[in-house]
Image: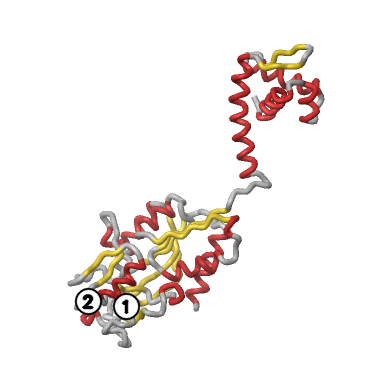
Amino acid sequence: MTLQQLHYAIVISETGSMNKAAERLYISQPSLTGAVQELEKELGITVFHRSARGVTLTNDGQEFIAYAKQVYDQYEQLTEKYGPEGNIKKKFGVTTQHYSFAVKAFVEMVKGFDTSKYEFAIREARTREVIDDVASLRSEIGILYLSDFNRKVITKILNANEIAFHELIDCKAYVYLWKGHPLADKKSICMEELGGYPFLSFEQNGNESFYFLEEIFTMNEYSQMIKVNDRATVLNLMVGLNGYTLCSGIICGELNGEDYRAIPLKDDGSDNMTMKIGYIVKKNRILSGLAKLYIEKLQEYLRG
């Protein structure tokens, strides 16, 4: 049984005539008759009752045509969506730790496309979710950082999921706080000076959550810590509570606003001062054109 035979049978049932069906299908009547006979032989039923007045469906034929229409309708929908003239939207997704530069690069990439023809997605998520989204191909690209402290654990998880990490930039740790914070005018800040203020940390889940924290210096004991789950709340708590967080220093003022400061954290001589921010992708997978363009926008922004 072929889709062509189903189509023939459906058209015959609609026209009630072999001649009219042959004309609509642009084939000869003998060819159409032969195709229907082969179909009936394969099915083991008589689909059409033939008479001098035309053709009508048998009881078996009525049931068969009902199913045939369902199948052929689905085929036509598939052809309409995925065929040469199809209207399927190209998809691209990225999942990232809470980095405004990742969002900015996404914005710059999307500007060049008609979004009615594409399905774009950007997700700010917990570290484990960044990895899981890339592993499951929910997102083609993930953005996260490695340090001496978390590298062994994160790399092990990446390898287990056949994911590769590609470094984008090395950066030192910065203190991120509100411009009205008592320490906002300092040229650099040491950890001891931050002791009286709440440390704002993006909440993580899982047994390895200690290694999944997005902020560098996760081994530190903070006298005051508040867990949050989105970037807007961090900014609000910076203003309301004089809170602070630790970051890469790569801040997009266009998106976060100009009311915040990124001030270098004084180097204590430890190797853990350096963050290696990069993107992750499935190993041995050819990147789409959209993914390559997004990486270019990331690199372009970071160079700036």
First of labels 1, 2 by sequence position? 1
Q: Position of residue 104 (x, y in %)?
A: 48, 70
Colour mode of the rendering: secondary structure
Above or below, 10 against 182 in this view is above
Q: How many marks?
A: 2
Q: Position of residue 63 (x, y in %)?
A: 59, 19
Residue sitting at 32 percent across and 87 percent down? 185
Q: Quadrant of residue 17?
A: top right
Instruction: For the residues labelled 1 and 2, say whether their Cβ atoms are less than 8 Å apart.
Output: yes
Above or below, 233 against 89 in this view is below
Q: Position of residue 113 (x, y in %)?
A: 60, 62
Q: Which quarter of the figure is the N terminus placed in?
A: top right
Give left or right: position of 216 versus 106.
Answer: left
Residue sitting at 32 percent across and 67 percent down? 233
Q: Position of residue 235 (x, y in %)?
A: 34, 72
Provide the residue designation for mark 1: 177
Residue sitting at 29 percent across and 59 percent down? 204
Viewer-proximal residue among 270 and 213 = 213
Task: Check residue 197 in the rendering and tell me which mark sits there, or answer none.
Answer: 2
Q: Quadrant of residue 50?
A: top right
- Cα separation between marks 1 and 2: 10 Å
Give left or right: position of 238 versus 195.
Answer: right
Amino acid at circle 2: Tyr
State the SS at label 2: loop
Above or below, 215 against 282 in this view is below
Q: Is residue 118 visible?
A: yes
Give left or right: position of 46 versus 127.
Answer: right
Residue count near mark 1 (Cα–Cα under 10 Å), binned few <14, some 14–19, many ≥20: many
